[in-house]
Amino acid sequence: MNVIIIEDEKPSARRLQRMLNILNIKTNTMLHSVEESIQWFQNNVHPDLIFLDIQLSDGLSFEIFESIDIKSAVIFTTAYDEYALQAFKLNSIDYLLKPIDENDLAIAVEKYQERTPQKQAVTLDFNDIKKLLVNPIDREYKKRFSVKVGQHLKLINIDDIECFYSENKGTYLYTTEGRNYLLDTTLEHLENELEPQTFFRINRKFFVNIHAIKDMVSYTNSRLQIKLKSYNEQDVIVARERVKEFKAWLE
């Protein structure tokens, strides 16, 4: 089986290559940009399977398919949330959310291997998919949260929340008034409930509201430290692997 990886973050590409090696799948070709990929496809036999990152350093990877007629099967590797990918999940082999889980990777490869040769060709409409990713599917996000205060319930509007964070196995929201409240949920569950243009998960422990950011400064190990308008209970740090995506989100 001829397999290639298209991924602009070289550490992520190497990690995926190592994970595939464990599954006895060899990948001798790794491409890192739209331009490099187009040139490669113009001069090489197309592979059986592509592991494709959506956002490359010089544009969306769908631009490759606008220039080259590629019939290879595709497994997406992406940091995009599931809701933005639902429309084409059935047409691709699968998609893997970063950081890629070993079991998910094995299942995706097995799905590819179980397909008959006649079904392995990609039938995606990449222009439609690109539109979905630039303008994600409209959906309803949470506009308020109910929290328990003593024997009472209090409603807090989403605009009044600076951040969500986890601490001591609990999940909390922090308000513009400087109060924190315990929630009966997890940060993982919140990923599908928060409007992605307003809230960003900067690390395993924090979601921040873009409107609550007061300042951003460089931090050790290529990270960023965020200063929020009210919250100051602990350092708010953008994880190194999320810095690039965070900067794109800000714009």
Image (tube, rainbow, N blue to C red):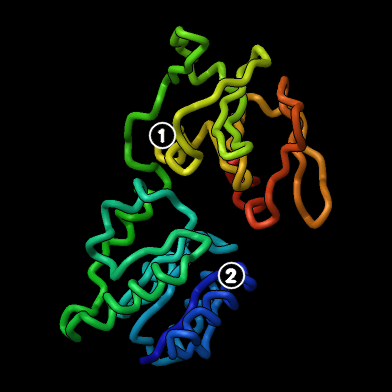
Q: Amino acid at mark 2?
A: Ser
| Residue occupied by mark 1 | 193
Quadrant location of the N terminus? bottom left
Viewer-nearest residue: 191 or 81: 191
Q: Which mark is residue 72?
A: none
132 vs 56: above or below: above
| Residue occupied by mark 2 | 12
Residue at the (47%, 10%) spot, across then down: 154
Q: Position of residue 233 (x, y in %)?
A: 75, 28
Secondary structure beneath disc 1? loop
Q: Earlier in the sequence, mark 2 or mark 1?
A: 2
Q: Position of residue 125 (x, y in %)?
A: 27, 61
85 vs 9: above or below: above
Residue at the (60%, 47%) spot, across then down: 204
Viewer-nearest residue: 220 or 52: 220
> What is the crowding at mark 2: few (fewer than 14 residues within 10 Å), some, or many (at least 20)?
some
Quadrant location of the C terminus? top right
200 vs 47: above or below: above
Q: Amino acid at mark 1?
A: Glu
Mark toward the viewer: 2 or 1: 1
205 vs 12: above or below: above
Q: Position of residue 155 (x, y in %)?
A: 45, 12
Is residue 11 left or right of 38 when viewed as pictured?
right
Viewer-nearest residue: 165 or 73: 165
